[in-house]
């Protein structure tokens, strides 16, 4: 089942033209596969080739198998994406690099676990849990925050997550 929050964010944009979307750490494709069927051109990047194999031959999807946590530059074109989605993935050292991948006026929709989640299940490792207001602190200088939530949600079971939507400032 896809992330309803991500889909609501994208639906609220009322997209009418073809756009480029990056699913960052796309996993099994539960988000990018249904999005690719909505006339959206998807780039899906993940280090797990077996997962990518399940959707690498679908229309409108370009899969890239790559370890996002090495010193190597990400094989992604700067200022190319209208939308970037990140769900249930966090790697702090390079997180700000997402900003340069967005086109002006592009959107970043980010949803992952935050502190407090360790009471309810995994992840419990602080490296994978956002701190209080962390998504805002990371992105709010270069991007315009549109919405932010940090708290309990029910995603099959209770968990604690942050959800932030941001827009990249245009030239004017
Ligand atoms: C919890 S899954 C989330 C997948 C997807 N975003 C979703 O919500 O279904 C985390 C994903 O991050 C990927 N991942 C973890 N470390 C990575 C790395 N260093 N480089 C690229 N992908 C990585 C894993 O392979 C996995 O598919």
Image: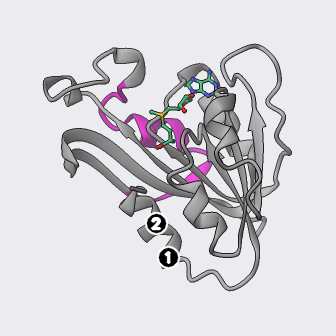
16 vs 81: above or below: below
49 vs 145: above or below: above
For the C terminus, the image quarter is bottom right
For the N terminus, the image quarter is bottom left
**Which label is found at residue 11?**
1
* Residue depicted at x 49% and y 76%: 11
Check disc 1: other Cα within 10 Å, few if <14, some if 14-19, many if 20+: few
* Residue depicted at x 70% and y 34%: 97
Q: Is residue 78 left or right of residue 15?
A: right
| SS of the residue under disc 1 | helix
Q: Is residue 99 left or right of residue 161?
A: right
Magenta span:
129-147
The spot of residue 162 in percent (x, y) is 34, 43
62 vs 27: above or below: below
Q: Is residue 103 left or right of residue 35?
A: right
Say which of 170 and 130 sits in front.
130
The spot of residue 35 in percent (x, y) is 59, 65
Say which of 132 and 73 sits in front.
73
Say which of 69 and 143 sits in front.
69
**Which label is found at residue 131?**
none
Where ligand 1 lies, by quadrant?
Answer: top right
**Which label is found at residue 7?**
2
Question: Gap in Å between the C-alphas at discs 1 and 2?
Answer: 6 Å
The spot of residue 3 in percent (x, y) is 40, 56
Can residue 138 be found in the magenta stretch?
A: yes
Q: Decide: marks 1, 2 in contact (CB < 8 A)?
A: yes
Q: Is residue 6 left or right of residue 153?
A: right
């Amino acid at each position: 089942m896809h992330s309803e929050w991500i889909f609501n964010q994208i639906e609220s944009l009322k997209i009418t033209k073809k756009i480029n979307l990056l699913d960052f750490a796309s996993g099994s494709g539960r988000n990018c596969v249904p999005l690719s069927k909505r006339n959206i051109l998807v780039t899906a990047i993940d280090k797990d080739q077996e997962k990518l194999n399940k959707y690498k031959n679908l229309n409108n999807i370009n899969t890239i198998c790559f370890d996002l946590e090495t010193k190597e530059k990400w094989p992604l074109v700067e200022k190319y994406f209208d939308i970037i989605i990140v769900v249930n993935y966090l790697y702090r050292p390079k997180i700000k690099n997402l900003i340069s991948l967005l086109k002006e006026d592009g959107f970043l929709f980010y949803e992952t676990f935050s502190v407090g989640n360790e009471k309810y299940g995994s992840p419990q490792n602080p490296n994978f849990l956002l701190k209080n207001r962390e998504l805002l602190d990371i992105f709010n200088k270069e991007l315009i925050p549109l919405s932010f939530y940090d708290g309990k949600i029910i995603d099959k079971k209770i968990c604690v997550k942050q959800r932030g939507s941001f827009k990249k400032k245009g030239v004017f």
